[in-house]
Amino acid sequence: MNSFKPDEHLANLAALGWLSKQPADFQSRMWELGRLTPLRRGRRLYTAGDDPDALYGLNEGLLDIAIPMLRGEECVVHRATPGFWIGDGALLPGAPRTLSVEAATDCVLFRIAFSDLRRHLSRTPGDWEYLHRLATINGTLAVRILSEVLSLSPRARVARLLLRVSSPEDTVDSTHEELGRLAGMSRATFRRSLSRLIASGAIQTSYGVLRIVDRSAVEREANVDES
């Protein structure tokens, strides 16, 4: 059996997200295929329409995921945290990228080139099962984001956004403007909903950083069913 183990530089991906939950032998095979690569804040990992080249796992930092709109505009729909994997959607069809991905902070990613991954899968086709699991995870995330936009009150959407993008230390390294854009709300609606949480003492905020002080209170707010 392959005994390759990730070193301390891959600690987040080894403990969080899709790959950390797969069988140890499959994890070992994936660690051997890829390498770490940095991505500076504000740089694009790829843009919708690009030719696909690799699967990526986020080990450090935050990534903004955007969908193309009319007139060349884009809408950020998700901010990914360590443990997140993306790029799998283009592995099978070999079609151009459908999303744009940009570093919201300095990032470190684990890159598995499609050429290496396809070669591996031709030799070990049973590993497709684990890639299908990743596709299911990302598909479920997309449906959840859409359902929240369509059905939840602004208060609940803001609370769920904060819980989703907060670090293990319960901090959110984003400005109010960035969070409002991620929530898909007008500035006034976002500020009104955020102000409720600040006034309740559930969160504290300063320039560029927000801290969840009472996580249970934010979780309760995430389930409110009224505007």
Image (cartoon, rainbow, N blue to C red):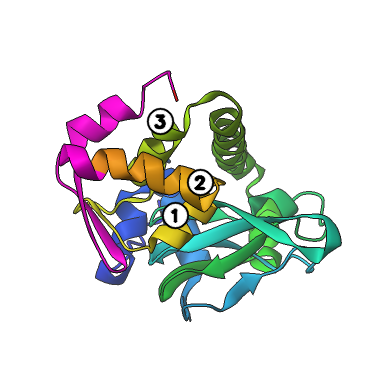
Side (left or right) of 15 relative to 109: left
Q: Earlier in the sequence, mark 1 or mark 3?
A: 3
Tell me the residue that label 3 is attached to: 156
Quick one: 32 or 52, which is closer to the camera?
52
Side (left or right) of 127 relative to 100: left
x and y percent of residue 134 in the render? 56, 42
* The C terminus lies in quadrant: top left
Q: Quadrant of residue 46?
A: bottom right
Q: Is residue 211 magenta?
A: yes
- In three-dimensional space, the C-alpha distance between marks 1 and 3, rounded to whole angstroms, equals 14 Å
Residue found 29% across the figure and 38% down from its top: 196
- The circle drawn on residue 179 is 1
Answer yes or no: do the residues labelled 1 and 2 have beta carbons within 8 Å? yes
Q: Please, is residue 78 above or below residue 202 in the view?
A: below
- In three-dimensional space, the C-alpha distance between marks 3 and 2, rounded to whole angstroms, equals 10 Å
Q: Please, is residue 161 above or below residue 52 in the view?
A: above
Q: Is residue 110 magenta?
A: no
x and y percent of residue 131 in the render? 60, 44
Tell me the residue that label 2 is attached to: 183
